[in-house]
Image: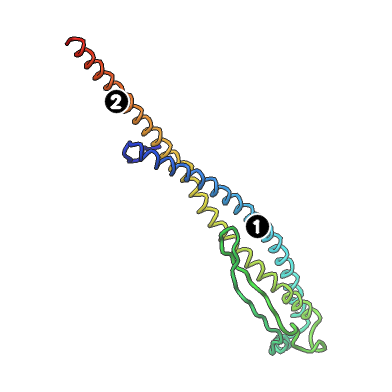
Amino acid sequence: MAILKINPTRMELIKLKKKLVTAKRGHKLLKEKRDGLMKEFMAIIREVKTLRESVEDKLALGFKAFLFAGADMNKEEIEEAFAVPSKKIRLEADTKNVMSVNVPRFTYKEEGDFLSYSLATTSGELDTSLKIFSDTLKDLVNLAEKEHSAKLMAAEIEKTRRRVNALEYVFIPDMAETFKYITSKLNEQERSTIITTMIIKNEMEAQEEAV
């Protein structure tokens, strides 16, 4: 704790008291914000964990099916199947406010069928793999949104934590210590004034009695 460089006057004491009240109120609000952010952050992390496990499982199945398709079809047949894409994907990016943090919001839209070839000319495993990959795209977009939101929330939590700590361990203790110091100084000045006044009064009374 450190004494702030403030003149020990009653006016400065009143100003400091107001600042101390404001700092304590701000500290309380920031702690509430930090706790709210942590709650939101943990909820997102749980969603990310569930989504990531689901996406990894689906991709593993998709790649497995694709490998089986490669065993049944030659390279030219696979390339021909992908020659004409029939599915269009549109991704719209926006933001939403969560606890004063602007996090991303992606809107996933798709048009057309994922199959752009004749089922009679391809392996069933290729159809299965493409269906899995197609269905997983939306989950991947959702996962990217959640993971980026988690990073932004984590940064805001750290920033809020530093502000809470600065108020709790530096600014508020320093102001409180300075408040006590100025109060002590003013009391000391007041006692000194009273003593001086009494001495002067006694001297005047002594002079009157001598006359």
- Relative height, residue 106 to residue 185 (above, below): below
- Relative height, residue 210 to residue 94 (above, below): above
The one of 66 and 20 positioned closer to us in this rendering: 20
- Relative height, residue 15 to residue 103 (above, below): above
At which x and y percent is residue 167? 47, 45
Closest to the camera, between mark 2 and mark 1, is 2
Crowd rating for badge 2 (residues with CA inside 10 Å; few <14, some 14–19, many 20+): few
Amino acid at dot 2: Thr
Which residue, given by chain and number where applicable, does mark 2 sit on? 193
- Relative height, residue 163 to residue 85 (above, below): above
Quadrant location of the N terminus in the rendered image: top left
Which type of secondary structure does the marked residue at label 1 adopt?
A: helix
Q: Which mark is residue 99?
A: none
Separation of marks 2 and 1 at Cα, in angstroms:
64 Å
Q: Residue at x 36, y 40 (%)?
A: 12
Crowd rating for badge 1 (residues with CA inside 10 Å; few <14, some 14–19, many 20+): some
Please tell me in which quadrant of the rendered image residue 63 appears. Answer: bottom right
Pick whichever of labels 2 and 1 is earlier in the sequence: 1
Please tell me in which quadrant of the rendered image residue 59 appears. Answer: bottom right
Quadrant location of the C terminus in the rendered image: top left
Which type of secondary structure does the marked residue at label 2 adopt?
A: helix
Q: Horizontal placement of 46 versus 211: left or right?
A: right
Which residue, given by chain and number where applicable, does mark 1 sit on? 45
Please tell me in which quadrant of the rendered image residue 120 appears. Answer: bottom right
Q: Residue at x 56, y 64 (%)?
A: 102
At which x and y percent is residue 113? 75, 84
